[in-house]
Image (tube, rainbow, N blue to C red):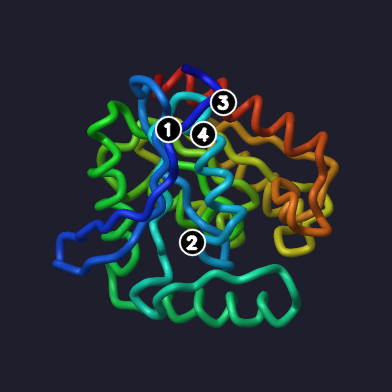
């Protein structure tokens, strides 16, 4: 039944190289209409990311949020202070420095596991937005991808990638991490991607951050749910 979920729980997944890592899983109360893999910000699979997964489960999807820091540090759950941000940036840099495929193997494992519920969509925020974009281009078995304010997505290197599934991207026009001229260049280079810009800052979807923007978050979520309804189920 839409609007209710079973209790979320931690599960263990295994990548192709044998690496084992945890993921938060939230299940819908009834039969799943598909699955959504939720990719964390630089703050870990914290209470906000778990609530995002819960919210997709409440819409009828099996939601899986893999711990994408696990290869460099276990059990990361940060808040949103300046100190937390510095810690998260350092962890992100450590993961980005891993030899290929690095964390993409873990995301592939999460997608493979989620596929038991049907088609799989991927949504990610901040660094998770960048990973969502890469997932659309590199990971198999993905039916739709929605990066939110993915830092790095609009760099020339990332813009040159070719997605293998439909993509909807959300950006904030006041985001000082992602200049608007690079967003426009990305949209021009990726005409098949649905790009939306909001009068908001970086992190506008997160109600635990000072940059939370309720109207932008609501509209982006409505668009994302409609997108997943079209492409995932």
Give whichever of 115, 1 is nearer the camera. 1
Marks 3, 1: nearer the viewer: 3
* Residue 144 image label: 1
Q: Position of residue 177 (x, y in %)?
A: 72, 64
Count neighbours of disc 2 (C-alpha within 10 A) and say few if under 14, some if 14 to 19, many if 20 or more.
Answer: few
Distance from the alpha carbon under mark 3 to that under mark 1:
11 Å
Which label number is shown at residue 56?
4
Q: Secondary structure at mark 3?
A: helix
User: Of the residues under marks 2 and 3, which one precedes in the sequence?
Assistant: 2
Q: Secondary structure at mark 1?
A: strand
Left or right of 172, for residue 93: left
Q: CA distance from mark 4 to mark 2?
A: 31 Å
Quarter of the rendering containing residue 105: bottom left
Residue 227 drawn above or below residue 179: above
**Which residue corresponds to mark 2?**
157
Front disc: 1 or 2: 1
Which comes before the other along the chain, label 4 or label 2?
A: 4
**Label 3: few (<14), some or many (≥20) within 10 Å?**
some
Is residue 95 in sight in this rendering?
A: yes
For this rendering, which residue is in front, 141 or 137?
141
Placement of the C terminus among the 4 image quadrants: top left
Real-space Cα separation, disc 4 to disc 1, in angstroms: 14 Å
Pointer 1 local density, CA inside 10 Å: few below 14, some 14–19, many at least 20: many
- Give the Cα distance between marks 2 and 3: 29 Å
Which residue shows up at 70% across the image and 51% down it? 206
Residue 107, position as x, y percentages in the image: 33, 54
Q: Is residue 154 visible?
A: no
- The answer for how far apart the CA atoms under marks 3 and 4 are is 9 Å
């Amino acid at each position: 039944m839409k609007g209710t979920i079973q209790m979320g729980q931690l599960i263990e997944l295994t990548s192709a190289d044998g690496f084992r890592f945890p993921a938060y899983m939230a299940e819908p109360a009834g039969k799943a209409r598909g699955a959504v893999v939720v990719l964390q910000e630089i703050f870990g699979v914290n209470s906000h990311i778990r609530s995002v997964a819960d919210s997709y489960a409440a819409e009828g999807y099996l939601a899986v949020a893999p711990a994408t820091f696990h290869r460099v540090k276990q059990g990361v759950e940060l808040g949103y202070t300046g100190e937390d941000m510095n810690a998260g940036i350092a962890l992100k840099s450590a993961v980005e420095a891993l030899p290929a495929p690095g964390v993409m193997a873990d995301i592939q494992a999460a997608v493979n596991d989620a596929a038991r519920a049907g088609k799989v969509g991927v949504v990610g925020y901040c660094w998770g937005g960048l990973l969502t974009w890469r997932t659309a281009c590199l990971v198999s078995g993905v039916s739709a991808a929605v990066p939110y304010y993915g830092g790095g997505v609009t760099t020339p290197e990332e813009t040159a990638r070719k997605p293998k599934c439909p993509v909807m991207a959300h950006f904030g026009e006041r985001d000082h991490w992602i200049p608007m001229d690079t967003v426009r260049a990305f949209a021009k280079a990726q005409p098949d991607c649905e790009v939306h810009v909001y009068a908001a800052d970086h992190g506008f979807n997160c109600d635990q951050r000072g940059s939370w923007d309720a109207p932008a978050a609501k509209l982006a979520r409505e668009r994302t749910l409609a997108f997943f309804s079209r492409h995932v189920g």
